[in-house]
Image (cartoon, rainbow, N blue to C red):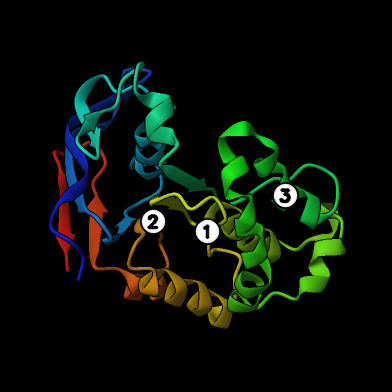
Amino acid sequence: MPQLNHQLEIQNLDIVFDKKTVLHNFCLQVSQGEKVVLTGPSGCGKSTLLKTILGLVVPNKGTILVNSKELDRDSVWEIRSQIAYVIQEPEFPEGRVEEVLKHPFTYKANTELRENLSRIPALFARFNLSTDLLNKDTGTLSGGEKQRIALISALLLDRPIILLDEVASALDKANKQAVADFFQEAKDKTVISIAHDTSWFDFADRIVQVNQNATGASTSP
């Protein structure tokens, strides 16, 4: 069971773009280790919410706390270092897949995690990928291969909070289940995932219905 301490708290969030309210008085609390799925119609602010948690979008009103630290211009880089973010259609630079996976560890902030690269074969197997892909050029990858490799790249950085934006949209049923099973078993990871596909809901502890231009959100276990 997830622990009861809140790793993420969103309080009375308002986001307005071009005089259009995207989110109004949105509140959410996520416990450490909890798996939450955000769902709702296109344009209701789900992706914007993830970007706001990362500090990429500044809300018009409200507060976001990560591990009890308020997100602001002074804390944003520290908070981002605790979060992995994977988008629906990842784009990779040209080069071999292995080089792309190794590149984040050339940065000083990640050099101490370089040993995590030894986990690549196990993660490839877990996500039904052949390690032969490591020698392929990123331009030859299918959409589903890109999504899983982006997930692996994020997992190698060992961030405690993972934000997923429709990351299984290009996967078939078996591979979608493999990814869902992995995150369901990852008790140390707090996961907030956007999804429209109800088959993805099974791995969640809680489903949050995001309502466009409405106060708050409805939740279900």
Res 167 label: 1
Where residue 147 appears, x then y in whole percent?
A: 62, 59
Q: Measure how far apart labels 2 and 3 are at the Cα level.
A: 25 Å
Q: Do labels 1 and 2 touch, CB within 8 Å?
A: yes
| Residue 151 located left or right of residue 44 | right
Q: Earlier in the sequence, mark 2 or mark 3?
A: 3
Q: Residue under label 2, please give it.
A: 193
How far apart marks 1 and 3 lie (CA) works out to 21 Å
Q: What is the quadrant of the N terminus in the image?
A: bottom left
* Camera sees residue 92: yes
Name the one closer to the observer, 91 or 66.
66
- For image coordinates 16% across by 65% down, the residue present is 220
Q: List x then y, in percent, for residue 16.
A: 30, 23
Amino acid at circle 3: Lys
Q: CA distance from mark 1 to mark 2?
A: 8 Å
Local secondary structure at mark 3: helix
